[in-house]
Image (cartoon, rainbow, N blue to C red):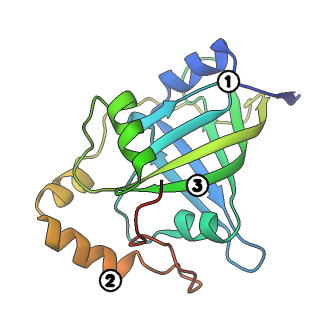
Amino acid sequence: MAKVFSALDETMRDFIARQHLFFVASATADSRINLSPRSARDFRVLGDNTVCWIDLTGSGNETAAHLRADGRLTVMFCAFEGAPNILRLYGQGEVLHRKNTAFADIVAKSYEGRTPAGTRQIVRLTADRVQTSCGYAVPVFNYQRERPGLDNWAASKDEAGMEAYWQEKNVLSIDGLPTGLFEEAEA
């Protein structure tokens, strides 16, 4: 049975801290729905209703385009080990670009001033609904390790090479929506 909360409590924060994987869903009224798995290594709880993660370079940038156009965002964590549980955070998301002051503040406070190679932006979610459900049907899996492929690929690129890749692959969504990746810094 689903339970709805207005904010994250300590039990939910502990659950998030133990997870290795989360899922992000976004869309606009006229776009395809995007659902992406993400490593939780760079996920941070910033407050009772605010979370963020470092968004690493990918083959697309759908979440950024959807947030720029619509703002709705859902994050889901599932327990693959231990007691069954599903935690969903619903709310409004925003993209903090690398030249944004808020990006620098979060990196300094929550990431010890460092970002992994290939950091494209930070996605921040302000949740207006927090929901748990049983997760009884989610299978049990054992975590083995992070995959090094993206980190290795990003480390092999210099800044110009990464920006060229972003220009080619990350400026528009698959539906042609702009992602705002190269917009000027915001206050």
Q: Amino acid at mark 1?
A: Pro
Q: Where is residue 100 drawn, in percent x and y?
A: 41, 54
User: Residue at (18%, 60%) from the top-left corner?
Assistant: 153
Of callouts 3 and 1, which one flags the residue occurring earlier in the amino acid sequence? Answer: 1
Q: Amino acid at mark 3?
A: Glu
Judged by depth in the image, the label closer to the viewer, 2 or 1, is 2
Viewer-proximal residue, 61 or 138? 61
Which label sits on residue 94? 3
Residue 117's spot in the image, x, y percent? 21, 51
Between discs 3 and 2, the one toward the N terminus: 3
- Which residue is at 66% across, 24% downward? 48
Disc number placed over residue 168 in the picture, else none: 2
Mark 1 neighbour class, 10 Å CA radius: few under 14, some 14 to 19, many 20 or more: some
Quadrant (top left/top right/bottom left/bottom right) for the N terminus = top right
Residue 102 left/right relative to 107: right
Against 120, residue 28 (above or below) is below
Secondary structure type for disc 3: strand
- Say what amino acid the circle numbered 2 marks: Glu
Q: Is residue 127 left or right of residue 54?
A: right
Q: Count the labels in the image.
A: 3
Label for residue 151?
Answer: none
In the image shown, does 87 or 96 lie closer to the viewer?
96
Q: Residue furthest bottom?
A: 176
